[in-house]
Amino acid sequence: MEIGVDCIEIKRFLQFEKDDHFLSKIFTEKEIDYCRGKKNSCQHYAAHFAGKEAIIKAISHFGIQLSPNQIEILNDATGIPYVNITAEHCGQYMVKISLSHSDEIALAFVIIDK
């Protein structure tokens, strides 16, 4: 079992929230739609980015290198976030994620188990 944590300042996403080219390098179409549907999209972009970074940190302990666009963080019908990883051989890993944000900081905590 491995853990990953990441936090990021939300204001870093202010300059990118309308930059489709930048966003599509990091986020999936579903993630972009989700974030844009929120009142303060930057908080949600930042939280999802922190989640991707936390996953990359944790899964690297298993010898796997991922890029942010190979990770998709979505929410189930009750709002609980879950993770899809599109990289080969990652289906065998269980990923649990928690995302949070204040007005200024977004935080993600991840546990990955094989």
Image: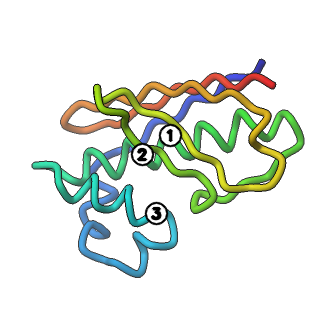
Instruction: Using residue 24 as the reference point, say whether residue 32 is left or right of it.
Output: left
Q: Amino acid at mark 3?
A: Thr
Foreground of the two, 38 or 30: 30
Instruction: Using residue 67 as the reference point, say whether residue 9 is left or right of it.
Output: left
Quick one: label 2, few (<14), some, or many (20+) residues within 10 Å? many
Quadrant of the rendered image containing residue 113: top right
Q: Please name the residue that numbered disc 1 is placed on.
A: 51
Q: Please name the residue that numbered disc 2 is placed on.
A: 48
What separation in Å lies between label 1 and label 2 (alpha carbons)?
5 Å
Q: Is residue 103 above or below residue 41?
A: above
Residue at image coords 21%, 59%: 36
Estimate the x, y position of residue 84 in percent, counting from the top left.
58, 45
Q: Amino acid at mark 1?
A: Gly
Of the 4 image quadrants, the one containing the N terminus is top right
Estimate the x, y position of residue 42 in percent, counting from the top left.
25, 53
The label shown at residue 77 is: none
Estimate the x, y position of residue 57 in percent, counting from the top left.
69, 38
Q: Is residue 52 above or below residue 19?
A: above
What separation in Å lies between label 1 and label 3 (alpha carbons)?
14 Å
Instruction: Using residue 4 as the reference point, say whether residue 22 is left or right of it.
Output: left
Foreground of the two, 96 or 57: 96
Q: Earlier in the sequence, mark 2 or mark 3?
A: 3
Q: Please name the residue that numbered disc 3 is placed on.
A: 28
Q: Are marks 2 and 3 in contact (CB under 8 Å)?
A: no
Residue at image coords 45%, 25%: 98
Of the 4 image quadrants, the one containing the C terminus is top right
Estimate the x, y position of residue 37 in percent, counting from the top left.
17, 54
Q: Are marks 1 and 2 in contact (CB under 8 Å)?
A: yes
Quadrant of the rendered image containing residue 13: bottom left
Q: Earlier in the sequence, mark 1 or mark 3?
A: 3
Q: Amino acid at mark 2?
A: His
